[in-house]
Amino acid sequence: MKKLYVANDLIEARLLDGILHSRGIGSVVKNESLQGGLGELPFVEIWPEVWVTDLKDWDIAIAVLEAFGNKRDLRDWICQFCKETNPGSFQSCWSCGEQIGE
Ligand SMILES: [Zn+2]
């Protein structure tokens, strides 16, 4: 077992898990249950994790993850400098020419 990805939320973790499964890659989502008990747990930073169960699938899993990440990057982004919204396919701001920041 090897940790592939730490997701921002459970929806994202399950989405990636589902894609991996559809490619025949064995994976599990960890920390899933820890997000369930709303109001029961104090706020702690525990994020859902996606683990690959069989290391022979690792290279494919990484490729899937990269494709998954690229798709996410196609969301609109907001320029840190001029606050204009840019389409996800733009690598730099249409308004001021600033590159995508972290
Ligand atoms: Zn800009």
Image (cartoon, rainbow, N blue to C red):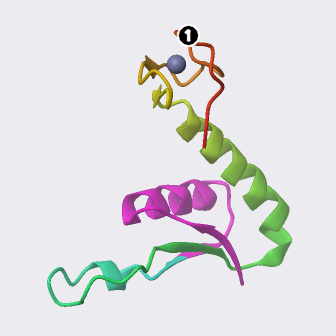
Query: Residue at the location (70% across, 51% down)?
Result: 64
Give 90 or 67, whichever is nearer the viewer: 90
Q: Residues within 10 Å of mark 1 (few under 14, many from 20)?
A: some
Pick the residue in front: 79 or 67.
79
Q: Is 95 placed left or right of 62 in the picture?
A: left
Expressed as whole percent of the image width and height from the top left, the position of residue 55 reads: 81, 76
Residue placed most toward the observer, 92 or 16: 92
What residue type is disc 1 on? Trp
Tell me the residue at 56%/12% (across/down). Answer: 96
At mark 1, the secondary structure is loop
Task: Give the extent of the magenta segment.
Answer: 1-28
Q: Residue furthest front?
A: 81
| Residue 10 part of the magenta-drawn span | yes
Respond yes or no on whether mark 1 lies under 8 Å from ligand 1.
yes
In percent of width and height, residue 7 lies at: 51, 64
Q: Is 37 on the left-hand or right-hand side of 72?
A: left
Which residue in the structure is indicated by mark 1?
94
